[in-house]
């Protein structure tokens, strides 16, 4: 704890009073995303929706627009749904009630119960798993339920009952900055004298993980139409509400919807989602007759609607006035 008090980073959601809303938004954004990447999105989101009532009243499209570029949009939809739950039933005051909110699993509930409510729940994320596997020199494969249960038990045993929120953040910080994957900084580590992996020389082999699934390559061709008389208008189509991913987002239409269109390939971009690597060719040319239902957008309007990351990448490279993410 002394080490954490000395080195902790000054992050916009680390308020002394443990503000519930700020902790909740930050913990949701930090799932699958690095701290440095989250900071600008966190500040933008808080500027749009400064408190839970404001978020509950917002339209879903506005919430997705404020989240645009951060990815994993189900997090934004759940945050919005949970804000409505809180607006009608009040702020949850313990771990079990936190679990009733949309999108909150055991990890986020423990992080929020400890950081925002000061209750003794150990939060075990990937960083904490790495630290504990090394401290205890545990060779268990980390996706196995028995290994997870063992690590959760150990984290709960180690937890500082007086400062549970700070303790959880200290463990995460240790994993993120010192006890890193590959080559940990054992010489600078504040707990190196307790570390069994260091003593046995096994720290680089831990934690034990199953091999990653192979990456799959997927080819896509998308159409970027130009409008006569202006270069700064872009035609986008909207994904339907039934889509499993990115429902309601705007994107470039697939080229194969226009078999007789004579666009030219102008650029290739690569976009990876988990194990799928999309190799996307952008085709450009004058708009054909008989466009499907969709909409022409000017540069200023593109910032007001949720646009897929692929479309944002393509439009930015084509200099269509899309703002940076
Ligand atoms: S001594 Fe090394 S392996 Fe052990 S917890 Fe510290 S950084 Fe991690």
Image: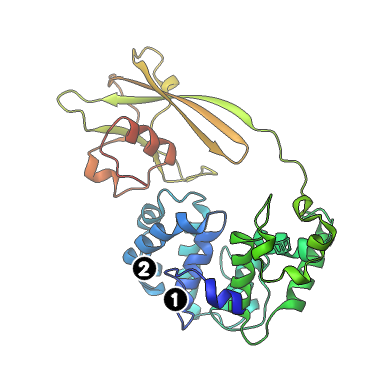
Asked if 11 appears above or below 253 in the picture, the reply is: below
User: Residue 297 occupies which quadrant of the picture?
Assistant: top left
Q: Are marks 2 and 1 in contact (CB under 8 Å)?
A: yes
Q: Quadrant of ligand 1?
A: bottom right
* Residue at image coords 45%, 51%: 70
> How packed is label 1: few (under 14 Cα within 10 Å), some, or many (20 or more)?
some
Q: Is mark 1 within 8 Å of ligand 1?
A: no
In percent of width and height, residue 243 lies at: 51, 42
Q: Is residue 160 left or right of residue 20?
A: right
Q: Residue furthest bottom?
A: 162
Q: CA distance from mark 2 to mark 1?
A: 9 Å
Asked if 323 appears above or below 14 in the picture, the reply is: above
Mark 2 element type: helix
In percent of width and height, residue 75 lies at: 52, 57
Q: Disc 1 marks which residue?
A: 87
Q: Disc 2 marks which residue?
A: 57
In percent of width and height, residue 275 lies at: 63, 37
* Residue at image coords 62%, 61%: 178
Quadrant location of the N terminus in the rendered image = bottom right
Residue nearest the viewer, comparing 129 with 21? 129
């Amino acid at each position: 704890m002394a080490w954490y008090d000395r080195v902790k980073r000054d992050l916009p959601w680390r308020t002394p009073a443990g503000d519930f809303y700020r902790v909740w938004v930050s913990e949701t954004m930090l799932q699958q995303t690095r701290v440095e990447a989250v900071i600008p999105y966190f500040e933008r989101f808080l500027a749009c929706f400064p408190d839970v009532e404001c978020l509950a009243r917002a339209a879903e499209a506005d919430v997705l627009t404020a989240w645009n570029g951060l990815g994993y949009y189900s997090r934004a939809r759940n945050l919005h749904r949970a804000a409505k739950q809180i607006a009608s039933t009040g702020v949850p005051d313990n771990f079990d009630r936190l679990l009733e909110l949309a999108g909150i699993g055991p990890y986020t509930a423990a992080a929020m119960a400890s950081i925002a409510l000061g209750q003794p729940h150990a939060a075990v994320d990937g960083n904490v798993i790495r630290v504990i596997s090394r401290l205890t020199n545990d060779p268990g494969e980390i996706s196995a339920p028995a290994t997870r249960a063992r690590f959760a038990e150990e984290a709960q045993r180690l937890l500082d009952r007086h400062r549970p929120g700070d303790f959880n953040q200290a463990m995460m910080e240790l994993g993120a900055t010192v006890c890193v994957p590959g080559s940990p900084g054992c010489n600078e580590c504040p707990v190196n004298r307790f570390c069994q992996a260091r003593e046995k020389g096994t720290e680089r082999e831990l934690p034990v993980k199953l091999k990653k699934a192979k990456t799959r390559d997927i080819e896509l061709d998308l159409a970027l139409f130009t409008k006569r008389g202006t270069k700064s208008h872009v035609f986008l189509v909207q994904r339907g509400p039934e889509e499993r991913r990115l429902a309601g987002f705007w994107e470039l239409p697939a080229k194969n919807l226009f078999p007789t269109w004579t666009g030219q390939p102008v650029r290739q971009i690569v976009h990876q989602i988990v194990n799928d690597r999309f190799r996307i060719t952008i085709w450009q040319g004058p708009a054909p007759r008989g466009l499907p239902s969709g909409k022409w957008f000017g540069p200023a309007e593109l910032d007001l609607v949720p646009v897929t990351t692929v479309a944002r990448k393509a439009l930015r490279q084509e200099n269509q006035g899309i703002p940076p993410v």
